[in-house]
Amino acid sequence: MITAHSGSDGLPANSRQFLKTATRWPVDALEIDVRWRQDRRQLVLAHDQETEDSVLLADALAIFRRQSHLQLLNCDLKDANLAGQVMDLAQRSGLADKIILTGTISALEQRRWPRHVWRNVETLLPEVNFDQLLNDHVMFTQMLKQAKKEGCQWLNLPFQLLHPVNLALLKDTDFHLSVWTARDVATTAVLLANGATNVTSLAAHAYCRTMEGGLSVEQAQMGH
């Protein structure tokens, strides 16, 4: 699977333009960032600080419903306790079966929506930092055990964690792997070749064009 990271291929992140354009691409999913805007008491699209121009999630779902028939929509939750609101809104929009939840997810939300959650590994052991997961195979193994305990079907993790030691540990599990964030066609291809079920890419459309044109990654990079 290929997911177009919000703002993929040079588009403005979390924008109507991204949604309207990327829904025409032959990708499997689109990613958007979701926050709760207290003053408007609504869910909005924003990675960090929302602005007056932030797109409402309700509007984003309406665009997605009109334009996309096969794709999934990955809502990357930037605040805690948003999964229920997102799923309720998606249900009312007729899109509940299209929603993937990543980001700030709790064990309770994991149990309630197991088919929809691609669990960010950093939420499984909050006291463990990235460097420990990267360099300490004991901590990485402990994270995998916690993921199994909490009923995870998917793990969502940064591509830097897919080094040979961790890949060997992952081969003994049945988790699906969603990996972020590939910044170019070559990285996207390498991650797919190394066990990723899904790659979230900033070059999603470029990768799809490369594959459709029958080009090798090397040829695409040379502009052939």
Image (cartoon, rainbow, N blue to C red):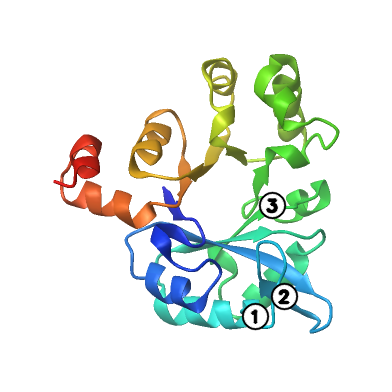
- Can you tell which quarter of the image residue 88 is in? bottom right
Quickly name the residue at label 2. 43
Whether 80 is drawn above or below 45: the answer is above
Give the residue displayed 15% in from the left and 45% down from the top. Answer: 214
Using the image, determine if residue 77 lies above or below residue 58. above
Say what amino acid the circle numbered 2 marks: Leu
Distance Cα–Cα, label 1 vs label 3: 18 Å
Which residue bears the numbered disc 3?
103
Check if mark 2's residue and mark 1's residue have beta carbons within 8 Å: yes
How many marks the image carries: the answer is 3
Residue at numbered disc 1: 56
Residue 124, x across and y down, in percent: 77, 37
Q: Is residue 96 visible?
A: yes
The extreme front residue here reads 222
Mark 2 packing: few (<14 Cα in 10 Å), some, or many (20+)? Answer: many
Near mark 1 (Cα within 10 A), the count class, few <14, some 14-19 or many ≥20, is many
Kind of residue at badge 3: Gly
Can residue 174 be seen here? The reply is no
Of residues 92 and 40, which is closer to you in this image?
Answer: 40
Type of the residue with mark 1? Leu
